[in-house]
Image (spheres, coloured by chain):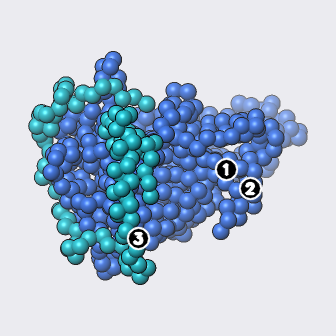
Chain colours: A blue, B cyan
């Protein structure tokens, strides 16, 4: 396939420059930390938050004579991830040394996989905000070691090195250059993160560095060959990925339109300005002198072992989304939001159990998520349990309270974690559907507003709303609006 | 394949080995001689031979996923020229 054939004729994401339209081409390299008890080639812990160099073995510190021994579970996690990405699993793969010099890389090389990775080509489906979906190709996934961490702000002329991350197992997941906008790149990372979390192969915690992305961006005229790309490294949130892409696209278009050329280079994203800048030029940076690691034999396993892993894969986001749409009648957008992680889906299924599924989805994605956002809390910290939210939805459906009153009850639930029944009882918020009580209120309102009744009967139809408002006010909002409307109409017109 | 002075100095820089200017030319000649000796291997026909990854025929040994090491920060930094509160301390390397 030649490059220009990959232009999507329906690409609505073209960017307007001063001299015409530009197409953006994006590929991502995501580094995902393998969820495991110990590191890739040593028996020390990869967990976050230990004191400096506490989770370091003599292997991780690259002491002379230390030899790497691979963690079988990390291999299994990589295979599982490959299967979740609908990718080819290579029964034979090779570990190579990627040589470069840096203070937080004690070996002087990273053990990685180069020409023969454990996982080959695959594909995932991303879900866009307008409810549509697109397929994005996966180029490969390989296992590699993480490096240590340097701190440059502790001392005026020294850097402090902590090797706790040194040797932690990473999966580098490389996409094909299939994305055409920052939104698609964000949707790709969101989906990848969901898949990894459903599989349990990476916790997807971007704040703690369990997932980071390098973004390759170039621009071209629609239909042209690929332009020269830049690589912006080490982005640790989906928001930063979007910002870095948009900044890079604007920068590249401006340079080309001014008659310049793009340098193929590595750039850094400055979170304070939202812009990218060139890393100090290092002509040798990409001369990694890969060669097979003589300390490690090739990684070989049986197809039957892969089949066993495949047989035990959990339900993945796409299957869950399809089931939510099918079983609960949710829209693609709502289903995507709820299928993003397992906790959300489990919460939803408890809220919706035996109730109006659509109403349950609205209350969860609009009211509950809105309230949690305001409180800065996660779903796991929600003051309202799924059973309580479900009960509230049930009370709306059976007419015990109106949707408007439900919002007051919900606000109280968020505040006190109380049960909706108790709150309604305590505050006397039960919706009045009793026709006798409503009729008395209507009679009262009509008697007190005889002049308006005459005007209405004289043809001023618009006053109907006034009467409804008066009755609802008299009932403190608790009268069933449907019953009020119906009875008023028959009394006024009858 | 012959190795010139520029290549020698680049490889030396990548390997963090200091070579004085007057040693570059002799080093280039020595390396060129070694390379041409190795190039004799090109005479062997390897058209139908798979690349050899190991001569032992053993499988890659693996270990269980358990924490069995670490928790020795003091030992890890013991030989460092400079350390501070468990960290290695090195000349500032900032990008």
Q: Do badges 1 and 3 share one subunit?
A: no
- Give the Cα distance between marks 2 and 1: 8 Å
Give the crowd class for mark 3: few <14, some 14-19, many >=20 residues within 10 Å. Answer: few
Determine whether the residue tagged by mark 3 lies in a helix, strand or loop: helix
Determine whether the residue tagged by mark 2 lies in a helix, strand or loop: loop
Q: Nearer the viewer, residue A394 or A492?
A: A394
Can you give x and y, in whole percent of width and height, for residue B88 in the image?
A: 22, 31
Can you give x and y, in whole percent of width and height, for residue A464 in the image?
A: 77, 40
The chain identifier of the residue carrying mark 1 reads A
Q: Nearer the viewer, residue A395 or A296?
A: A296
* Labels 2 and 1 touching (C-beta < 8 A): yes
- Give the Cα distance between marks 1 and 3: 38 Å
Task: Determine whether, in the image, residue B56 is placed left or right of residue A111.
Answer: left
Give the crowd class for mark 1: few <14, some 14-19, many >=20 residues within 10 Å. Answer: some
Can you give x and y, in whole percent of width and height, for residue A428 in the image?
A: 46, 39
Give the crowd class for mark 2: few <14, some 14-19, many >=20 residues within 10 Å. Answer: some
Would you say residue A1 is visible in this rendering? Answer: yes
Can you give x and y, in whole percent of width and height, for residue A322 in the image?
A: 53, 67
* Quarter of the image with the C terminus of chain B in it: top left
> Which residue is identified by label 3?
B42
> Which residue is identified by label 2?
A224
The image shows residue A487, relative to residue B83, as above or below, that is below
> Which residue is identified by label 1?
A227
The chain identifier of the residue carrying mark 2 reads A
* Labels 1 and 3 touching (C-beta < 8 A): no
Give me the residue at 70% from left, 56% from top.
Answer: A225
- Mark carried by residue A44: none
């Amino acid at each position: 396939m030649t490059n220009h054939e990959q232009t999507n004729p329906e690409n609505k994401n073209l960017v307007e420059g001063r001299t015409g339209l530009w197409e953006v081409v994006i590929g991502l390299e995501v580094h995902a930390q393998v969820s495991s008890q110990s590191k890739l080639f040593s028996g020390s812990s990869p967990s976050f938050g230990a004191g400096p160099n506490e989770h370091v073995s003599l292997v991780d510190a690259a002491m002379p004579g230390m030899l790497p021994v691979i963690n079988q579970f990390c291999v299994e996690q990589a295979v599982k991830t490959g299967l979740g990405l609908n990718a080819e699993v290579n029964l034979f793969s090779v570990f190579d040394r990627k040589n470069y010099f840096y203070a937080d890389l004690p070996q002087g090389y990273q053990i990685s996989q180069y020409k023969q990775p454990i996982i080959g080509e695959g594909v995932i489906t991303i879900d866009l905000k307008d409810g549509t979906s697109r397929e994005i190709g996966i180029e490969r996934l390989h296992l590699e070691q993480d490096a240590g961490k340097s701190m440059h702000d502790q001392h005026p002329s020294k850097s402090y090195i902590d090797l706790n991350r040194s040797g932690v197992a990473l999966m580098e997941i490389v996409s094909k250059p299939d994305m055409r906008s920052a939104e698609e790149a964000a949707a790709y990372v969101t989906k990848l993160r969901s898949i990894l979390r459903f599989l349990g192969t990476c916790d997807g915690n971007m704040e703690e560095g369990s997932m980071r992305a390098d973004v390759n961006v170039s621009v071209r005229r629609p239909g042209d060959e690929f332009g020269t790309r830049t690589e912006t490294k080490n982005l640790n949130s989906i928001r930063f990925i979007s910002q870095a892409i948009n900044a890079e696209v604007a920068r590249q278009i401006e340079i080309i339109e001014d008659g310049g050329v793009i340098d193929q280079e590595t750039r850094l994203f400055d979170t304070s300005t939202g812009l990218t800048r060139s890393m100090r030029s290092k002509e040798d940076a990409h001369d990694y002198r890969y060669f097979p690691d003589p300390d490690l034999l090739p990684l070989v396993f049986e197809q039957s072992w892969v089949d066993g892993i495949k047989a035990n894969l959990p339900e993945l986001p796409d299957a869950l989304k399809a089931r939510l749409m099918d079983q609960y009648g949710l829209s693609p957008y709502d289903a995507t939001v709820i299928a993003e992680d397992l906790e959300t889906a489990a919460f939803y299924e408890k809220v919706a159990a035996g109730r109006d599924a659509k109403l349950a989805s609205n209350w969860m994605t609009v009211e509950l998520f809105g309230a949690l956002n305001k409180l800065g809390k996660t779903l796991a910290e929600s003051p309202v349990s799924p059973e309580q939210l479900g009960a509230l939805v049930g009370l709306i459906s059976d007419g015990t309270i109106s949707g408007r009153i439900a919002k007051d009850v919900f606000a109280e639930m968020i505040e006190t974690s109380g049960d909706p029944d108790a709150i309604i009882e305590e505050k006397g918020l039960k919706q009045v559907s009793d026709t006798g009580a409503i009729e008395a209120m209507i009679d009262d309102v009509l008697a007190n507003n005889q002049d308006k009744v005459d005007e209405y009967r004289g043809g001023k139809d618009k006053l109907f709303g006034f009467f409804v408002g008066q009755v609802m006010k008299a009932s403190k909002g608790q009268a069933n609006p449907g019953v009020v409307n119906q009875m008023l109409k028959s009394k006024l017109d009858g | 394949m012959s190795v010139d002075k520029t290549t020698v100095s680049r490889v030396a820089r990548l390997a963090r080995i200091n070579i004085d200017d007057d040693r570059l030319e002799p080093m280039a000649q020595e390396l060129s001689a070694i390379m041409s000796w190795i190039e004799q291997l090109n005479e062997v026909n390897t058209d139908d031979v798979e690349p050899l990854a190991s001569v032992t025929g053993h499988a890659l040994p693996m270990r269980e996923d358990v924490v069995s090491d670490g928790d020795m920060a003091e030992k890890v930094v013991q030989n460092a020229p400079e350390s501070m509160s468990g960290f290695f301390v090195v000349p500032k390397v900032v990008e």
